[in-house]
Image (cartoon, coloured by chain):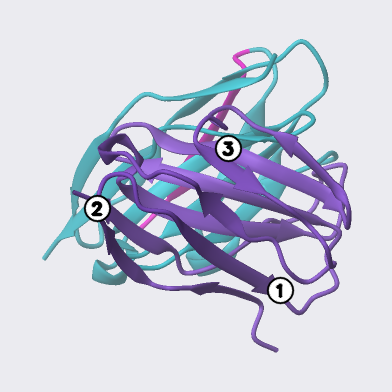
Amino acid sequence: AQSVTQLDSQVPVFEEAPVELRCNYSSSVSVYLFWYVQYPNQGLQLLLKYLSGSTLVKGINGFEAEFNKSQTSFHLRKPSVHISDTAEYFCAVTGNQFYFGTGTSLTVIP
Amino acid sequence: NAGVTQTPKFQVLKTGQSMTLQCAQDMNHEYMSWYRQDPGMGLRLIHYSVGAGITDQGEVPNGYNVSRSTTEDFPLRLLSAAPSQTSVYFCASSYMQANTGELFFGEGSRLTVL
């Protein structure tokens, strides 16, 4: 069975600082990995996804993630955050369904 | 192109009342699903459908019914609401059943059961 663990429930970071949101997964089969973002009072929208190929995946709004099979991780990074990045971020893995992590609340401090 | 549309956005029910959350998509997606979002628990799958006439249970199906009579619509029914069903509900759809594609989400329906 597939599962996802997001290690940090809340991450505060100052504006223009770098950020890393951590995600570890478990699966007995090949996986597809996703990061979604949820802005306040909105639904989720796709940031980026890894299906195959290059392990460094670039997404929207300057975010990127690296798939590390040996460490079963798919951490999300951004070199310089903006106030508008304040949101909830969800890591997800697919098998026969999408399995979501519990989310990481990113707060960017001016 | 409206995407995934959910109604109502907000609803307050009394324990024991019934209601239906509506979900419609105009992208001709075969796959549709319902999630509930609760603090600290992420999104949990309630029911899903891989096409008209086909539905199946997810992680937390108890207390909920679904049907899929058309490709576009996937309503979620609460037959007898309980306070434990207070949550934010999201409908999502995808073109590819194999889940390598993107899930498109509605804006959510916030339900409070008193």
Look at the image and say whether residue A76 sits in the magenta stretch.
yes
Residues B55 and A26: in front is B55
What chain is tagged by disc 2?
B
**What residue did someone put label 3 on?**
B45
Residue at position x 28%, y 46% from top? A105
Q: Position of residue A56 (x, y in %)?
A: 67, 43
Helix, strand or loop at label 2? It is loop
**Mark 2 Cα shell of 10 Å, populated few (<14), some (14-19), many (≥20):** few
Do the residues at pointers 3 and 2 share their chain?
A: yes
Q: CA distance from mark 3 to mark 2?
A: 24 Å
In this rendering, the label closer to the viewer, 3 or 2: 2
Q: Quadrant of the N terminus of chain B?
A: bottom right
Q: Is A95 above or below relative to B1?
A: above
Tell me: B107 left or right of B95. Answer: left
Q: Looking at numbered disc 3 in the image, what kind of residue is underneath it?
A: Leu
Magenta-drawn segment: A71-80
What is the three-letter code of the residue carrying label 2?
Answer: Lys
Task: In the picture, one chain is purple; tell me its letter.
Answer: B
Q: Is there CB contact under 8 Å for labels 3 and 2?
A: no
Helix, strand or loop status at disc 3: strand
Q: What secondary structure characterizes most of the magenta part?
A: strand
Chain A color in figure = cyan
Which residue is labeled 2 in the image?
Answer: B14
- The image's mark for residue B25 is 1
Alpha carbon separation for disc pair 2 and 1: 29 Å
- Provide residue A34's location: percent of width, then percent of height: 63, 44
Crowd around label 1: few <14 · some 14–19 · many ≥20 (10 Å): many
Judge left or right: residue A1 versus residue A40.
Answer: right
Q: Position of residue A95 (x, y in %)?
A: 77, 28
Question: Marks 3 and 1: in contact by CB < 8 Å?
Answer: no
